[in-house]
Image (spheres, rainbow, N blue to C red):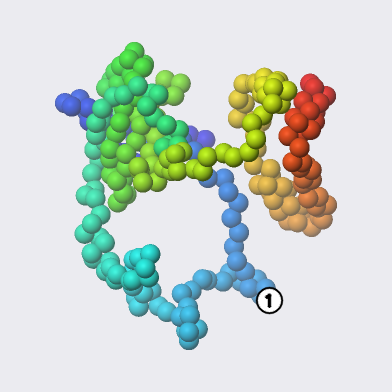
């Protein structure tokens, strides 16, 4: 199936302009369910309910409020929030080009493929320049009422724009408590090294599937045909607090499977 563009914009790098189309680079495949009345199986609707009276509160009577850590409420109107939204624009501004190593994977949020919008001359020139320099762009744009910062990079020759999380959303590793416990002895370190080396392999994305989604799809298909599906819960492996024993068992299992 041919991909459909979800948005159009213009990449700006100083005086250079590159009209582009954005395509979703990932697809949400989560299985969703409808809520039905148990009696007549008609779809039910969710409603806002007053916690004391149990009465349904209509949408026009609802107000938004920010609740502070101390429990104080600040009422915000729809007009006030609308006035704070970024101005709509089709511009994707390239702020700088940086080495790829400066982008920490924790910052990546959602990727978009970029395709040419009209003539591909400027598009191809940008892709060639990025491939020749090995640099990635830092971009800023507004899309559907939200401001984004992103990384512009190449993937198999195609420019990809990856929306980045903002600074306040990324938890620094320094905030984690320091690991505690006794130091590993030489035998445990050697077994751990062997285990890592024996599990070294190329990453094959097709080998990792959403098993829960597959089991639900099988159940839905079976019930739709009036068949019963034997449900078997996944088995959990036993755990042990003995690190040496766990490493030995793991090495033995890897050798057996090899």
Q: Is residue 203 above or below residue 78?
A: above
For numbered disc 1, what is the local secondary structure? loop
Given residues 180 and 93, the one toward you in this image is: 180
Q: Is residue 24 above or below residue 99?
A: below
Q: Residue at x 52, y 40 (%)?
A: 178
The number of numbered badges drawn on the structure is 1
Q: Is residue 117 above or below residue 49?
A: above
Task: Tell me if I can see residue 128 in this picture.
Answer: no
Task: Tell me if I can see residue 51 in this picture.
Answer: yes
Residue that carries the numbered disc 1 in the rendered image: 39
Q: Position of residue 146 (x, y in %)?
A: 31, 49
Given residues 249 and 175, the one toward you in this image is: 175
Furthest residue in direction front, as rendered: 182
| Image quadrant occupied by the C terminus | top right
Q: Is residue 17 left or right of residue 182?
A: left
Determine crowd level at label 1: few under 14, some 14-19, many 20+ residues with C-alpha closer than 10 A: few
Q: Residue at x 79, y 57 (%)?
A: 226
Given residues 40 and 218, the one toward you in this image is: 218
Q: Residue at x 37, y 70 (%)?
A: 71
Given residues 69 and 210, the one toward you in this image is: 69
Q: Is residue 190 above or below residue 70?
A: above
Q: Position of residue 151 (x, y in %)?
A: 35, 32
Residue 18 figure quarter: top left
């Amino acid at each position: 199936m041919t991909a459909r563009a979800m948005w159009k914009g213009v990449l700006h790098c100083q005086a250079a302009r590159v009209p582009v189309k954005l395509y979703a680079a990932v697809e949400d495949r989560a299985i969703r369910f409808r809520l039905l009345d148990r009696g007549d199986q008609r779809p039910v609707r969710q409603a806002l309910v007053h916690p004391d009276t149990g009465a349904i509160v209509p949408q026009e009577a609802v107000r938004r409020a920010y609740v502070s850590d101390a429990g104080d409420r600040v009422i915000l109107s729809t007009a006030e929030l609308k006035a704070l939204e970024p101005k709509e624009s089709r511009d994707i501004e390239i702020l700088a080009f940086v080495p790829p190593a400066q982008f920490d994977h924790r910052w990546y949020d959602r990727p978009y493929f970029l395709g040419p919008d009209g003539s591909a001359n400027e598009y191809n020139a940008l892709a060639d320049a990025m491939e020749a320099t090995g640099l990635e762009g830092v971009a800023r744009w507004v899309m559907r009422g939200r401001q984004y910062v992103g990384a512009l990079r190449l993937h198999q020759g195609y420019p990809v724009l990856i929306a980045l999380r903002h600074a306040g959303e990324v938890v620094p590793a320094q905030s984690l408590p320091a690991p505690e416990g006794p130091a590993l002895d030489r035998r445990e370190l050697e077994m751990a090294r062997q285990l890592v080396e024996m599990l070294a392999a190329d990453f094959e994305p097709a080998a990792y599937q959403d098993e829960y989604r597959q089991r639900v799809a099988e159940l839905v298909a079976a019930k739709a045909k009036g068949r019963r599906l034997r449900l078997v819960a996944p088995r959990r492996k036993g755990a042990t607090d003995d690190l040496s024993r766990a490493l030995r068992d793991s090495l033995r299992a890897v050798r057996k499977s090899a």
